[in-house]
Image (cartoon, coloured by chain):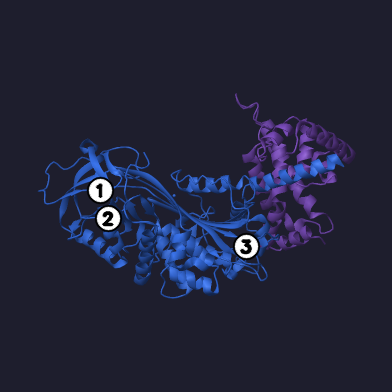
Amino acid sequence: MRLNNFAKKVGRELQADLAGSTPEAWPAIEAAVRRAEPQAESGKPRYGKRKWKFAAAAIAVAVCAACVPLFSDLIPVIQAEAKTAYDNGGRLSDVSSEKCSEDFIESYNTFGLDLLKQLDASGKQNVFLSPASVYLALGMTYGGADGRTAEGFVKTLRLSGSDFPKFGENCRGLQAMMTGDSFRLANAIWIDNGFRGRISDSFLDRDRAYFGASVGTLRFASSAAPKIIGDWIRKNTNDRIDPKIKEFDPDTVMLLANTIYFKSDWKDQFDANNTRDDVFHALSGDKTLKFMHGMRGGYFEDETLQGIRLPYEDGKTSLLILLPKKDLSGMASSLSAEKLAAFLRQGRESKESAQLSLPRVHFSYDATLNDALKAMGLAEAFGGQADFGGMLRPGGGNLAISKVQHMTALSIDEKGTEAAAATTVAMVASAPVMEHEMNVDHPFFAAIMNDESGAALFAGVIADPSAGE
Amino acid sequence: MDDINRLLAKAGRGDGAALESLYRQLGNGVYCLALSILGEKGAAEDVLQETFVRVWTMAHTHSPGKSGRSWILAIARNLCLDRLRAAQNAGPSQEGEEERSGSEALSFVDNLELKDALGKLEEQARKIVVLHLAAGFKFREIAALLGEKQSRVQRAYYAGVEQLSAYYTIQ
């Protein structure tokens, strides 16, 4: 009897460990059986037309954890057709030429700026977001919301209507901005082994179709679960994001995640020989930092700020820097999607140059977005009244969001963004006539922008450029 | 017809959802079996994938009167044995790799004390204990998979658990 009880306890522990450690092989099996072409089903493909390729990579991460009791069963997974192609790790590998509507970009940028203001744009501390990452993670969650909870998403995401297919198409367009060698993007949904049977097929199909989300199962209570998800995030962010998840809330049954990684050289690199120590006037006190120097075009200014647009080598993305003439909080609080679009346009059309002094930047940022999102209209999604009926099969209970976590990392140096080495491209010997000076020596606003649409893919206020060193 | 046989029949007719259900039900066990036999995580994952691809292409050949679960586990075991044979035929292992085989058989065990205690068991006893307790295999299934008599498997299991309880105290 004693031995039986001992064996049962050991068995429970081993079964939990095994469930948590068994690799999620289904995507690879699925890809292989498609190639295996077994007994075809009346001429109709069993799986969609998506391509499944392996790639790699990521910089920002937004995670939504939904909580409820456990259950046990299995569901079939049907692949939805999608114009956008992802590999079986949920990573975007190709995309059709879909574009976002102009009103969507405005509502998207409004969402990003409002979230930034909620978090603290005072310039006392670094706050750097990827609105795109938060938006896509919330977008996947919105796909399963019903009733007033869905209305909360419409309000929070600053949408003009509740047409989900239209929203999904626009999200594809947003993802299409992040293709090419300089970007890596991935979406994934993890479901607890015991909860799998309660998740609706149509919810998974929707998120696969619009977000290419890979779906995996694991046991959140297992000590292996934090490592599995941590590894996925590290792998897709080129190790720039280390989520340091120790354990999950024991009630966690689903996790929706997005990662974005960006790395590109400047179109016009800074000469490392011109980098020298200078003082950055942070609100917490002066700091001596390495400042890069160079003459750059794309300069503009008005009575409240100096601005400059620094294009990347990828030809479609640029860094927009807005340096307040007075305080950052006043400038940031007055920023709107319309103004941001106007500043980007000024930067693109500007014929003026400035002798730019820009500090090297290296830091990471980590924030729980619950309170900010609740204040923006998503409160119901976090509470007992939440309605995620669209995620569940009939009688599947209910779900609520427990935590939305966001992490970013940013490095700017002479070579570009996230480049470790210094230098290379020499400045032209015939220096242009100096018309302006722009010394980014106090807290500033920075955004990595898609040039064509004007979408801010990353945006934030930088109070201490060296916080990560 | 039990659930596994029903799913196998559907997979044999080209139902991808049925194949995924089979994978969800038996994937852990197949991985555990492969890890026990091969002792390498990467190889075990390969076998896990290959097993269900093989199930997909062969499901229509499964006889409905026979246990589908045993049939799938036998595919996994045979794939493991094929790998071991291929490794033996490949000649001597490279320097520094002699000790690799079997070193990851317990890699899925999170509790270090339990892992240490399991590691002290004789290899065959350890396989039997792990396959029964972790993967939930029945003694007759383990006997068939390891080519042992069921009575010997049961004896080895009870001796193994007795030994394990001496090494490891549950907190």
- Residue A16 position, x and y percent, is 69, 47
Label whose residue precedes the other's in the sequence (1 or 3): 3
Q: Looking at the image, is mark 1 or mark 3 nearer the viewer?
A: 1
- Residue at 39 percent across and 57 percent down: it is A119
Q: Looking at the image, is mark 3 or mark 2 nearer the viewer?
A: 2
Q: Label 2 to label 1, Cα distance in Å?
A: 9 Å
Residue B97 seen in the figure: yes
Structural crowding at the residue carrying mark 2, measured as other residues with C-alpha within 10 Å and reported as few (<14), some (14–19) or many (≥20): many
Q: Chain of mark 1?
A: A
According to the image, label 3 marks what residue? A77
Q: Which of the 4 image quadrants contains residue A238?
A: top left
Residue with the most extreme left position: A433
Q: Chain of mark 3?
A: A
Q: Amino acid at mark 1?
A: His
Chain letter for blue? A
Residue with the most extreme right position: B151
Structural crowding at the residue carrying mark 3, measured as other residues with C-alpha within 10 Å and reported as few (<14), some (14–19) or many (≥20): some
- Asked if B9 appears above or below A415 in the picture, the reply is below
Residue closer to the observer: B8 or A403: A403
